[in-house]
Amino acid sequence: MAMVDLKREGEVFILTMQNGENRFNRLFIEAMNQALDTVEQSSGPAALVTVGGEEKFYSNGLDLAWLIGDGLKERKEFIPAVLRFLGRVMAFPVPTVAAITGHAFAAGAMLALAHDFRVMRADRGFFCLPEVDIKIPFAPGMTALIKSRLPPVTLRDLMLTGMRVGGSEAKERGIVDEAVSADQVLPRAIGRAAALANKDRKVYQTIKRGMYADALTLLESGVADLSQLD
């Protein structure tokens, strides 16, 4: 089975991540970027929804087992590639909505935050930034991305405590825009995306690049301290 599946329903592209926990390794990021290429190369009104293929997971972030194993020699190139990927999603020229049907942890949570909007399941699954507990500091671009999306108190609590936040609390804390029942996550995300699909792509992207200029500069530079992964 392919790591990702991309289909189109009307004006909305639905990108399903279908690689278990959807952890980031080279092949996964390549597959995601190829799907984004397809969306960008399309014409006419469009929007993008991403969703996890398994109910339990949206994405659990970096594939740390791969990074200290088969991906060890690729680490210096791979981490900057992840940062640039997050920047690409953040500045994507069509509206983006993350449909969070399960756990969104670490870089997987950052992927959700890189979208314009987020819809999360209310009753199960956690949003978490566990870097403080797994002893991996945030790259500057990651901090800027998270900071651009979250209220200050939520930012402090998530980044400094590693707390796990369920969907209903995530809505209360301003992490997601909606917290709904499991069967409504994808339909509501598609609905949000469809309502914005007719936005002019060039104008939409220009506005986003202006809103998030500082974060995008850091993400696109790919700067990261890799010593903590040794």
Image: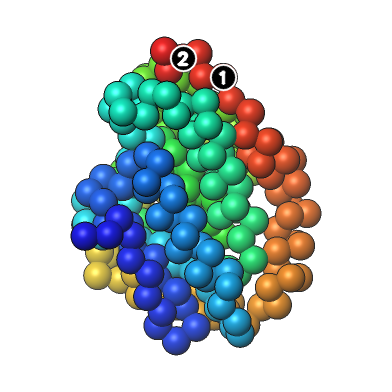
| Image quarter hosting the N terminus | bottom left
Q: Nearer the viewer, residue 6 or 131?
A: 6
Secondary structure category for the residue under label 2: helix
Q: Give amino acid for label 2.
A: Gln
Residue drawn at point x = 44 percent, y = 38 percent:
107
Secondary structure category for the residue under label 1: loop
Q: Nearer the viewer, residue 116 or 35?
A: 35
Residue drawn at point x = 38 percent, y = 69 percent:
6
| Image quarter hosting the C terminus | top left
Residue matched to label 1: 225
Would you say residue 223 is visible in this rendering? yes
Q: Nearer the viewer, residue 164 or 195?
A: 195
- Colour convention: rainbow
Residue matched to label 2: 228
Q: Residue 178 at x, y = what percent? A: 43, 62
Residue 18 vs 142, above or below: the answer is below
Q: Residue 93 at x, y = what percent? A: 64, 66
Query: Splitting the image into 4 quarters, where does residue 14 fall?
Result: bottom left
Mark 1 touches mark 2? (CB < 8 Å): yes
Residue drawn at point x = 54 percent, y = 47 percent:
85
Would you say residue 154 is visible in this rendering? no
Residue 205 vs 167, above or below: the answer is below
Q: Residue 117 at x, y = what percent? A: 52, 60
Residue drawn at point x = 30 percent, y = 24 percent:
69
Q: Label 1, label 2: how many angstroms apart (C-alpha)? A: 7 Å
Q: Residue 10 at x, y = what percent? A: 44, 86
Q: Give amino acid for label 1.
A: Asp
